[in-house]
Image (cartoon, helix red, strand yellow):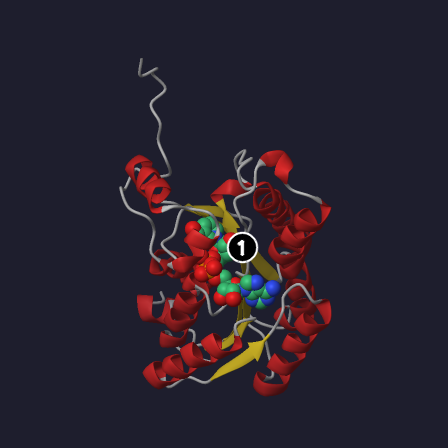
Amino acid sequence: MKNIQELFDFKGKVIIISGAAGAIGSEASRFLSSLGANIVMADLAEEKVKKIAADIEKETGNATLVMKVDFTEEKEIENLVKNTVDKFGKISAVINNVGWGANTPLFGSDTEKMVNGYKLNTLSAYNLTKFCMPYLKKEKNASVVFSGSAVGNTPSPEFIEYSTAKAGLLNMSRSMVVASGPEVRFNSLIIGTIDNGASSKEAGYTQEMIDNVVKGIVLKRRGLPQDIANAMAFLLSEAASWITGTELTVNGGGVYKSKMPTS
Ligand SMILES: NC(=O)c1ccc[n+]([C@@H]2O[C@H](COP(=O)([O-])OP(=O)(O)OC[C@H]3O[C@@H](n4cnc5c(N)ncnc54)[C@H](O)[C@@H]3O)[C@@H](O)[C@H]2O)c1
C-alpha cells in the first residue's frame, strides 16, 4: 500500500498551468512545485508570472518554465506545448485554469463579447488539451483538470458571456472523458466564490455584493486560492488514479436560500 507521501509525490512530473499569474493558478503552481513537480507557468501577464515563478523556484528548488501566452491565440498555445517538451521532454498533466468574465446584463452583450468569452474560457482549454494529448498519452496517471465555475452549472444571466462559456467547458470536458480513457483522466472543478483580490472587483463585484454572497455561503467565507489548489493536487495525484469524469464542487457548501417566503 502507498503512503500519503508516495500518493502525493509529484517529483519528475511536468505540469502546465494556464493563467498561472492569477490567484488560483499561482497558488496551484506553488503547491504542486512544493510537492516536487516542474511547473510550466503560462500567462499573459509576463512580468507578474516571471516574479511568481522566481519566488517559487527559490522556495522549492524545483525548476519552472515561464511563458508569456495569450490563450486566445492558437499558435501561442501550440508554441507553449513545443517549448515545454523541448525543455522537459514530457507533459504529465495540464490544469486548464485561465478564464475570466465580466458582469453583463443578459441581453446587454454582443457577438464580439460572447465570442471573446468563449475563446478565453472554452477554446483555450480545447486547444491546450488537444496539443498536449500526444504527450499525455505516453505518461502514467496522466491527468487534466478544468477550472469550471458554479455559474456554468446554474442559470447565471448576470454573467452571460462567462456563464455560457463555462457551461461549454463542462460539456467539452465530459466528451474528452468518454473518448480518452483509459490513457488520460479528465476532471472538472466547479468553483464557488474565491477571494482573488482585485480580479473580483474588475468583474463587477462591489464589497457590498461580496459581503452579501458570504452571508449566504454555508461555510460563511469566500474560498481561498489554496482551497482550490488542494483539490487540483488531489485530482492530479496518484490518490485519484481511479477518478475520471468527476465534477468536484468546491464552494463552501454553496449559497443557501430558505425555501420559505420571508414575508
Ligand atoms: N475567483 C473565483 O471566484 C472563481 C470562481 C469560479 C471559477 N473561477 C475560475 O478559476 C480560474 C482562475 O480564476 P482566478 O480567480 O485565479 O482568476 P484571476 O483573475 O486571479 O487570474 C486569471 C489569470 O488569467 C490571466 N489571463 C487573462 N486573460 C488571459 C489570456 N488571454 N491569456 C493568458 N492569460 C490570461 C490573467 O493575467 C490572470 O493572471 C478561472 O478560469 C476562473 O474563471 C474563479
Q: For the residue with label 1, is its CB less than 8 Å from the closest atom of ligand 1?
A: yes
Quarter occupied by residue 84: bottom right
Q: Is the N terminus in the top left, top right, bottom left or bottom right quadrant?
A: bottom left
How many residues crowd around disc 1 within 10 Å: few (fewer than 14), some, or many (20 or more)? some
- Secondary structure found at label 1: loop
Quarter of the view holding residue 18? bottom right
Measured as percent of width and height from the top left, residue 245 is found at: 55, 49
Kind of residue at badge 1: Trp
**Which residue is labeled 1 in the image?**
100
The residue lying at 36 percent from left, 54 percent from top is 195
Report the side of 151 relative to 184 (left or right).
left
Q: Position of residue 262 (x, y in %)?
A: 31, 16
Which of the two residues, 182 or 81, is positioned nearer the viewer here?
81
Front residue of 162 and 34: 162
> Where's residue 79, x and y in %?
68, 77
Using the image, determine if residue 89 lies above or below residue 26.
below
Instruction: Check the image and name the residue furthest to the top.
Output: 263
| Image: 171 above or below 154 | below
Q: Residue drawn 65% across and 73% down?
A: 135
Q: Is residue 194 above or below residue 157?
A: below
Task: Identify the residue at horizontal 54%, vertical 68% (top origin).
Answer: 93
Count every numbered label the image shows and give the total.
Answer: 1
In this view, the residue farthest toward the left is 220
User: Residue 229: horizontal and vertical position, in percent?
Assistant: 39, 61
Q: Quadrant of the C terminus?
A: top left
Picture quadrant where residue 152 is located: top right
Residue 133 visible to the viewer: yes
- Does residue 176 appear in this view? no
Q: Nearer the viewer, residue 177 or 212?
A: 212
In this image, 241 relative to 31: left or right? right
Choose between 2 and 233: the one closer to the eye. 233
